[in-house]
Every structure is written in structure tokens, then in C-alpha cells.
Image: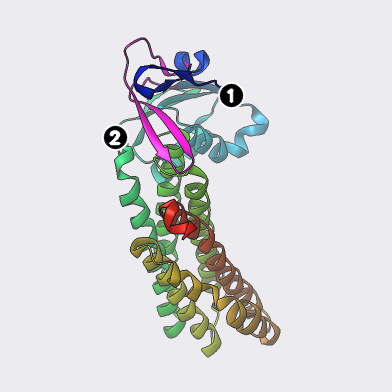
Amino acid sequence: MERKLIKQGGGGYTIYLPKKWIDRKGLKGKDIVDLIELDNALMIKSSIKGKKTSFVKIEEETKKNLKEIVTFLYRAGFDEFTLENVDEKSISEIQKITKNLLLGFEITKKDSSSVTLENISEPTDQKYDVIIRRIFLIIREMFEICDKSGKDVSWKKTEEIEEMRNQVDKFVLFCRRTIMKEMYEKNPVFGWELLNFFALTGHSINYLYDFASENKIKTGDTFLMLVEALIKQFDLLYNAYYSKNIGLLYKVSAYRGTHLFGKCTQYIEKAKGKEAVIASYIRELVRLMQIGINPILAELISNIPRRDIEN
């Protein structure tokens, strides 16, 4: 929507804020809002936190989608939501979803046909950057476990890998919730893309490990070489993000030719039977490392003063 600038004394300008937004936020005259500058955009952030609630009736055909419904309500920013028309089996599943994926939420009410989930101890949005670092470290550890299991051909840490995947999903959902609640103080598009990268990487490692464990895969030197290369690429992404060094991203990009279209393709061509599935997972992870370049590069460039970019 467009708004016309209204000139005020002293060289300042004002605009009218949309009434629907004011009403939704519960604001009134003389309330304080925060203004956050985002490159060529300006975010208006309300410091008033009203409680956002929802009631959802679960139809019989949607019971198989409970995870998607619950995580959507959480991600959408609701502080309390009640799911109605649920049976004992569904309630048990909702309890599991809450424990594994909803950071700071607990079931506060429950009867034979409904359950209420509520924000009890959710971290503040100031923890966003801390949680991003934690996600990086969890995925790094998942890669390390794959490397060690491939070397000793044990593949015995499936439960540990699954728990780490759940942690990544839980933290990613919280960060997405923070963005949806308009509490994220950077470009939300770049933040969302980085979170997608984390989620896809965590899931791909989990799938690879489960398949290797179930099928007792004996990996060779090529697998180990590619996993070590993945760890190096992920470390470059991590260091680029925190040292704000764009040059490190170019090093990740260099793996595109040598690994994504080179060694990974050769690995798939030579792999036989079930190892070919493992090879395809490895290639997907190498591809994801290339995808991870984009949101990090975009965020780093957006933080460079405009005069430095022009020069």
C-alpha cells in the first residue's frame, strides 16, 4: 500500500499508519512503536504484545496432517491454540509434536476431545542470533557423526542423529515464528532462505544416516573423501557468516565444478546397489552447500554501506 509523506516542521515527515494494522496490534494514541531501518526499507515494530489465540476443529480427513497443522499455528505466531475434535491417539501425537518441535510450548488443557497448547517459556526474539549459531553447530556435529560412522562402519547413532534433526527443526520453527511475528530486525527474505537451508541439510543428513544404518552400508574412500569435503564447505559457510568474509563463499562455490559436477557424479556412476542411494544423498548435500551461499551472501552484501558498494 502507498502512503503520501506529510511535511512537518523542522524538515520531518509523517505518514498515516493503516487502521487495520493499528487495530490488529491493539495500539492507541501515544503508544510507542520502534522504527528499524532495513537497507532500502523501514520496519515499524510494535512493542505491545497482545495474546494471539486460535481454535481449530480437526476433521477426520485432516488427522493425518496434525504435524503440519500444529507447526503452522506455532510458526504463524499464535501464543495459544486449541485443537478440537481430537481423539486419544491424536492427543498422544500432539504431545509428541509439542515436545519435539515447539520451543517453549506446553499442553495446558486436555480433555477427551480437545487439547490446548500455550506459550509457557518461549525464548525472547533477542535469542534469535544465539539460536542460529546453535543450529550451525548441531549440523556440524551431525556431519562429524556421519564421518566417524563411515570410517568404522558402525552406523549405530540413529537415535542421536534423529534427536539432532528434531533440535534443528525446533530451532528453525522458532526462528520462522520470530520472522512471522515481525520481531526479526534484518531482511526477512534472507533469514527465511537461510532457515530453509538449515532444515533441508538436517533432514538430508538424517535420511542418509538412517538408510546407511538400516542397510548396513560399507562405504569406501570416495564416500569418506566427499563427507570430509562437505564438512570443509560447511565450515566455510559458518566462518563466512560470522567473520563477514565474502571471499570464503567463493571457496565454497569452487566446489561446484570439482564435486557437484565432478566427483559426486563419478561416485553415482560407479556406485552399485544400495550404495548408489547413499551417493545420491551425498550429491544432494553438496548441492545444498551451494544453496547455502545465497542467503549468507545476500545478508553480507546488505550490511555493506552503500558507498562501499558503489566504490
Whether residue 156 is visible here, answered yes or no, is no
Residue at the disc numbered 1: 2
- Residue 309 is situated, as x and y percent measured from the top left of the image, at 47, 58
Tell me the number on the disc at residue 121. Answer: 2
The vertical placement of 245 against 11, above or below, is below
Q: Which residues are magenta?
A: 24-52
Whether residue 81 is visible here, answered yes or no, is yes
Residue 50: in magenta span:
yes
Residue 48: in magenta span:
yes
Q: Is residue 52 left or right of residue 277?
A: left
- Residue 165 is situated, as x and y percent measured from the top left of the image, at 45, 57
Give residue 142's quadrant in the image. bottom left
Q: Is residue 22 left or right of residue 33?
A: right
How many numbered discs? Answer: 2
For label 1, the SS is loop
Q: CA distance from mark 1 to mark 2?
A: 38 Å
Say which residue appears at 51% left-offset and 17% top-offset. 18
Amino acid identity at mark 2: Ser
